[in-house]
Amino acid sequence: MRLTKDVPWQDRMRAMLRMPVAERPAPEKEQRHEDDTGPAVPRVLDLTLRIGELLLAGGEGAEDVEAAMFAVCRSYGLDRCEPNVTFTLLSVSHQPSLVEDPVTASRTVRRRGTDYTRLAAVFRLVDDLSDPENHITLEEAYRRLAEIRRNRHPYPTWVLTTASGLLAGSASLLVGGDLIVFVAAMLGAMLGDRLAWLCSSRGLPEFYQFAVAAMPPAAVGVALTLTHVDVEASAVITGGLFALLPGRALVAGVQDGLTGFYITASARLLEVMYFFVSIVAGVLVVLYFGVQMGAKLNPDAALGTGDDPVVQIIASMALSLAFAVLLQQERSTVLAVTLNGGVAWSVYGAMHYAGDISPVASTAVAAGLVGLFGQLMSRYRFASALPYTTAAIGPLLPGSATYFGLLGSRRARWTGSGLPVQGRGAGDGHRHRGEPGVGDLAALPEGAGRGDRGGPPGGEADARLLTGAPARTRAPLRGPARRSWSPGPAQ
């Protein structure tokens, strides 16, 4: 890797981080301070940690966070710096020379939120700091960082709620739904989003927020079945749940694993598992009562696809657009990622449906094109690749395949008392007359949510629903969980 100045700073910093400390080139002595005593090391390390905290909390990969922290240290002339990033802890160590004691600082990331607009602003700050032609003092860097923290989200709450509904409706079209299914899934997802906000205002952990948000789509599907409306109720439930599935966390976890940050990758993937489990717990509660009321659902019926390729492409683009809004992306990047999502789905459809190629190979090629576009745009704009890839790759993630794969992992029959018991396996080819199909949902994992703030199931939820959040946390209230989904092609 060349270390010339025309190479993006991300590539230069990654290359130097892989070098032994003794072989790294010395940083240029830029005059970024008022006197000749040099920058204050503790303040530089504090600024580095604060920048890394915003990046890691915003969903950036661990490798890029380390590269940004290393770039900030070198921009202020600190040689022999070693940043270290895990899922919840940031640390950086600076040793002035071999005979001096190192100075180490750390910072814990306790809250996470999805805001790619803030992520892009932090990248611009790091890019300006890394440019030798810019002379940014520590005070100016702190001021810009404070402005980034204070900036409001680019989209109001009602836009986010509408985007959540559009996302669910578009996903229902991708699994073979019609206009009625689109409207039903949209209404269910919007209601779930509002309930999640209500739970967050009461101080409930995200464990319960996701479980509560998953109930309205399932309730809408059950209601349509009980009223004998001629629609695919399973498509309504599936489309509504796509707005909750953790596509962003899954992409970040895979990225960390591929770049060698296995501890962080394991933590992110464990978080994904908890998200899935939380969603399934909410759905099971609604479907259990639905079965007791006489609803007979067949989840396998949602495994179809639409017949009109134009509708599918438009739905995939609308899906990517809604996903980008939920990720709080800058308006200047929304159009590009929307078109990229449509191209990705077109490539997948041409290879799988028209060319009869394996869905795995088709998805791999389409996802590769999405990643290539994101990397090219990130290098062109010296920005993060996440705003150009995460939302565009959404239609390709195996949301429906994963969902129904879990349904078919093992079958269960509902006894007369309504309690699930172990039944025949999904692959044995047997299906009993009168078996409602929703019993398959019992095969999904138990429990749910993000375990970093969750307590014992039940007790904390009951207490907070009755008493609300503690007085010291009412102002400001904790923001709700921003859910990013992972819709996928019906397979």
Image: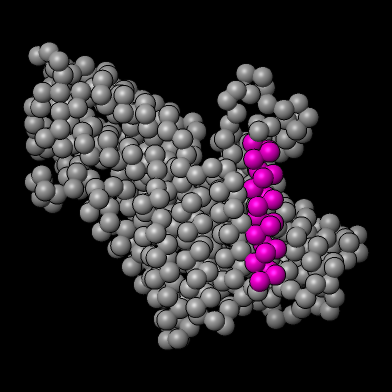
**Does residue 315 appear left or right of residue 262 in this picture?**
right
Q: Quadrant of residue 412?
A: bottom right
The residue sitting at 70% across, 81% down in the picture is 429
Q: Residue furthest right?
A: 416
Q: Quadrant of residue 440?
A: bottom right
Count of picture labels:
0
**Does residue 34 appear left or right of residue 256 in this picture?**
left
> For this rendering, which residue is in front, 21 or 324?
324
> For this rendering, which residue is in front, 421 or 241?
241
* Place of residue 352 in the rendered image (x, y in percent of width and height, measured from the top left): 45, 81
Q: Is residue 423 visible?
A: no
The residue sitting at 33% across, 68% down in the picture is 369
- In magenta, the rendered stretch is 179-200
Q: Is residue 471 above or below residue 75?
A: above
Q: Quadrant of residue 355?
A: bottom left
**Does residue 248 appear left or right of residue 137 in this picture?**
right
Assign the magenta stretch its main secondary structure: helix
The residue sitting at 11% across, 35% down in the picture is 133
Say how the picture is coloured. Answer: one colour
Magenta segment includes 300 = no
Q: Is residue 469 visible?
A: yes
Q: Is residue 446 above or below residue 153?
A: below
* Place of residue 430 in the rendered image (x, y in percent of width and height, measured from the top left): 74, 80
Magenta segment includes 186 = yes
* Place of residue 471 in the rendered image (x, y in percent of width and height, measured from the top left): 67, 19
